[in-house]
Image (cartoon, rainbow, N blue to C red):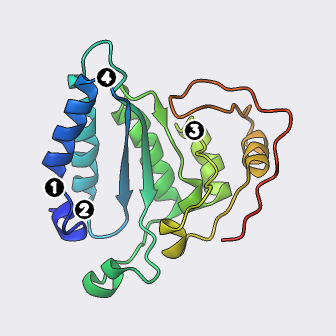
């Protein structure tokens, strides 16, 4: 119901899940997201988690399948969804933190749960590290979709590391396959100009 309403012109949920099943059979790694805080019900949020969990259960034993699950809140500034459907994001920080915790519990077969600092900000993302998230997210080289919808949060590689350390954790650089990487000795500080 939700995807049909908010993603007109895109494949429906069942089609997307089918593509993920095929990708996992081909041993391709994927990630799953959930944008919430718009027109969905609490029950639909958990149905979303259940479907993701089931697809991950079905993957071949040696395949990684979903490497990460990233829940993020609907950003409603100047969006068509807000203008036409009158969707409004009423998600509270506590609700987001609970979603991270429930994702960790509900998705034991997905190793990485990512906090969306881009949509919830530094403080909430830091709390999420204590609530089940093990990934703070990454820097955005050229992010323009979520920021155009009103997400005001910005980080550089240095400020992300500082935020993780402030939360009581040790930052670890990774690649897109969740393999640890060394932090380069010489790295140019990113200039945020978007």
* Label 2: which secondary element: loop
Identify residue for label 2: 41
* Residue 155 in picture, x, y percent from top left: 70, 57
State which quadrant residue 73 falls in: bottom left
Residue visible at 28% across and 13% down?
A: 61
**Element type at mark 3:** loop
Q: Earlier in the sequence, mark 1 or mark 2?
A: 1
Q: Is residue 55 above or below residue 101?
A: above
Which residue is under mark 3?
135
Kindly report the distance in space between the C-alpha atoms of the residues bearing marks 3 and 2. Answer: 26 Å
**Left or right of 13 on screen, residue 110:** right
Mark 2 nearby-residue class (10 Å; few <14, some 14–19, many ≥20):
few
Q: Is residue 184 left or right of residue 78?
A: right
Give the label on residue 27, or none.
Answer: 4
The quadrant in which residue 108 appears is: top left
Q: Give the labeled residue for mark 1.
A: 12
Q: CA distance from mark 4 to mark 3?
A: 23 Å
Which comes before the other along the chain, label 4 or label 2? Answer: 4
Q: Is residue 63 above or below residue 184?
A: above
Q: Which mark is residue 66?
A: none
Element assignment for label 4: loop
Q: Quadrant of the C terminus?
A: bottom right
Q: Residue placed farthest to the top in the image?
A: 62
Q: Residue furthest bottom?
A: 83
N-terminal of the two: label 1 or label 3?
1
- In the image, taking residue 16 as reference, residue 154 lies left or right, namely right
């Amino acid at each position: 119901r939700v995807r049909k309403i908010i993603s007109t012109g895109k494949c429906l949920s069942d089609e997307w899940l089918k593509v993920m099943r095929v990708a996992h059979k081909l041993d391709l790694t994927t990630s799953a997201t959930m944008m919430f805080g718009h027109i969905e019900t609490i029950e639909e949020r958990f149905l979303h988690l259940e479907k993701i969990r089931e697809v991950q259960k079905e993957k071949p034993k040696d395949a990684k399948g979903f490497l990460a699950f990233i829940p993020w809140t609907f950003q409603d500034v100047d969006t068509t969804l807000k203008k036409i459907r009158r969707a409004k994001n009423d998600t509270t920080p506590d609700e987001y933190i609970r979603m991270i915790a429930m994702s960790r519990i509900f998705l034991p077969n997905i190793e990485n749960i990512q906090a969306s600092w881009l949509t919830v900000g530094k403080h909430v993302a830091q709390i999420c590290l204590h609530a089940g998230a093990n990934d703070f997210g990454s820097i955005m080289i050229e992010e323009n979709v979520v920021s155009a919808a009103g997400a005001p949060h910005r980080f550089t590689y240095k400020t992300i590391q500082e935020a993780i350390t402030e939360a009581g954790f040790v930052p670890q650089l990774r690649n897109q396959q969740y393999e640890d990487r060394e932090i380069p000795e010489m790295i140019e500080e990113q200039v945020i100009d978007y």
